[in-house]
Image (cartoon, rainbow, N blue to C red):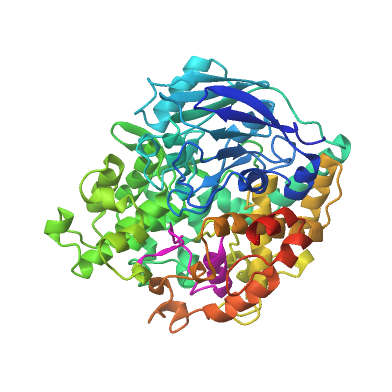
Amino acid sequence: MYGYHGKFLKVDLTENRVSELPLAEDDLKKFIGGASLSAKLIYDQVKKGMDPLAPESPLIFSTGPLTATSFPMVSRYAVSGLSPLTGYWGEATSGGKFPFRLKESGYDGLIVTGRAKKPVYLHIENGTARIREAAKLWGKDIYKTQQMIAEEVKEKRSGVACIGPAGERRIRYASVMNDEGRAAGRCGLGAVMGSKNLKAVVAVGNKRAEPADRAKMTELSKQANDIIRGSMLTLAYREYGTMMYTDMGMILGDVPAKYFTKNVFPVEKVTSQTIRQNYSMGNYACLGCPIGCGREIKNFRKGIDSVDGPEYETLVAFGPLAMNFDLDSIIYANHLCNANGLDTISAGVSIAYAFYLAGQGVLNKKKAGMDLKWGDGKTVVKLLEMIIKQQGIGKMLSEGTLQMARELGRDEGEAAQVKGLEMPMHEGRAFHGLAASYATGPRGACHLKGDYYTVDIGGGVPELGIGSTGNRLSSVDTGERAAKFQSIKDLYDSLTLCKFSPVPISLIGQALGAITGWEYTPNDLLTAGDRSMTIKRAISNKLGLKRKDDKLPKICLQALKEGSTTGKTPDMNLLLKDYYKYREWDWDTGRPTEKKLNELGLGWIAEDLYKK
């Protein structure tokens, strides 16, 4: 098999045993790699009522055929399993050096089950693996953990993915961290690692998967690099990172504030330019990336020489969403999340919900243990510290907004989440195609599984006819486009390829063909994305997901009285009807139809979902 090692490492922590899992060529052709292949490997292990934190719950780290090749922007990996935050399919991706190291270790990925008796870490090197004792690492933050493992392994080319105290404490939105502050942030898969007493995965090696056509791959990689370097977005990302969007996004009504009840605020206080003017900022790149969108703030404060980030999502979650414009507190909150391994989006939304509840008279000083006032950056940091330490009100906030609403007896429509996963920092009221993506995303509310705002501001996939309708505030003729774009962006997590890549889908297909020796047209790639979306949906269906769960919370649907989206709200029924028609999902049950499952080569799933 070209482009693959053709095997996963299989780890049973209960039995303290490692073995190899061969990969079928047909599975690789259909599911390609990354999170999609992980879904294929996980499907049969998923049982109704399965606890994501139970020993038998599987956890997969996976790369794709593009990983560790000469193609640019492909140093990414996916972590997949069942989300302890939502109870459904969960996945998260991250970049850095670790993805290359994992692929070079001689495996396409690893699947972990069981629970070790004591803390351990997994050491993979050139096709062999050891389960090593990690008691001395338990309780350490992710920076110290990575440092200590590097010193113990004594290999400069090693890569480490690990959890911090948040994962050890099984906080339901704990992250998996790698390459210092890079985060596979969403869905709480760090808690799954913690439940298995697995502190880290370290990978090292020099095994490369041979491409089918090396000369063609070299030429296509050059073309891709030329396209990336010639893109205007490359310069913007390099200079300002993802924060470059903040001021433009507010003009479009796409930056939520005051817990999704406003979209106009003093944006000049939290722009990338303002941060550059007030802090010494540098940038860094994932391995093989010509952009370098990663942020690093140097000489942040006494005792903290440098911190990672923040990025756009984090800036807004700890900033405008809580009406907090104190940059020091936003940056420090991001650092706390990174060091302890915590998803900044779920943490920020949960804290903003607490402020909102205080404004509603629900969380008074006695209940909260403190005054909760909009814009209080010190309280944002204090609440975050309480979440991490599982103290006081922090324990309730660590369950996420849906559980907070239930515990307090509030209307669940007040909880800013979809299927339990907190809303990201882009607005479905500003881009109606995004509303469809949020409601139907395979892991819940997700701006990366169909970042439809990029379509409406000039992006899209012209080879597949995916482009803006010309009216971002209209739900007409949008659901199908959103579904197709969602499939293509889901495909990126199979390849694995950074979603910031401006390379055309036709060139991506050629590169995949040069690596694997198999032919992929743009339509073939769309079908692969559809197949991936469908199997992930089927996993969640097995776990109880239904049609009624495809919805946005009321707090994010109420028309606002200010900004460029004044009086506008997406027509969810229209969007979902259009979306379901394209996907061929049953409108009553929310399950993929037997006909569609068979068309996608998923007949065995049809037999399972529709067994009499």
Residue under the point 58% across and 68% down = 590
Q: Which x, y percent locates residue 517?
A: 86, 42
Is residue 461 or residue 222 the one in the foreground? Answer: 461
- The residue sitting at 18% across, 56% down in the picture is 368
- Whether residue 561 appears in magenta in the rendering, the answer is no
- Return the residue nearer the eye: 183 or 42: 42
Residue 143 horizontal side relative to residue 33, left or right: left
Residue at the outermost bottom position: 567
Q: Position of residue 157 (x, y in %)?
A: 60, 23
Percent across and percent down for residue 433 are: 58, 72
Q: Is residue 382 visible?
A: yes
Image: 502 above or below 564? above
The percent coordinates of residue 217 (x first, y second) are 83, 40
Image position of 185 (left or right of 213): left
Q: Quadrant of the N terminus?
A: top right
> Relative to the observer, which residue lies in front, 558 or 111?
111
Chain part drawn in magenta: 415-441
Res. 73 visible in picture: no
Residue situated furthest front in the rendering: 612
Q: Is residue 454 above or below residue 207?
A: below
- Say which residue appears at 48% left-offset and 74% top-offset: 429
In the image, residue 424 lies in the stretch drawn in magenta: yes
Q: 96 or 491, which is in the foreground?
A: 491
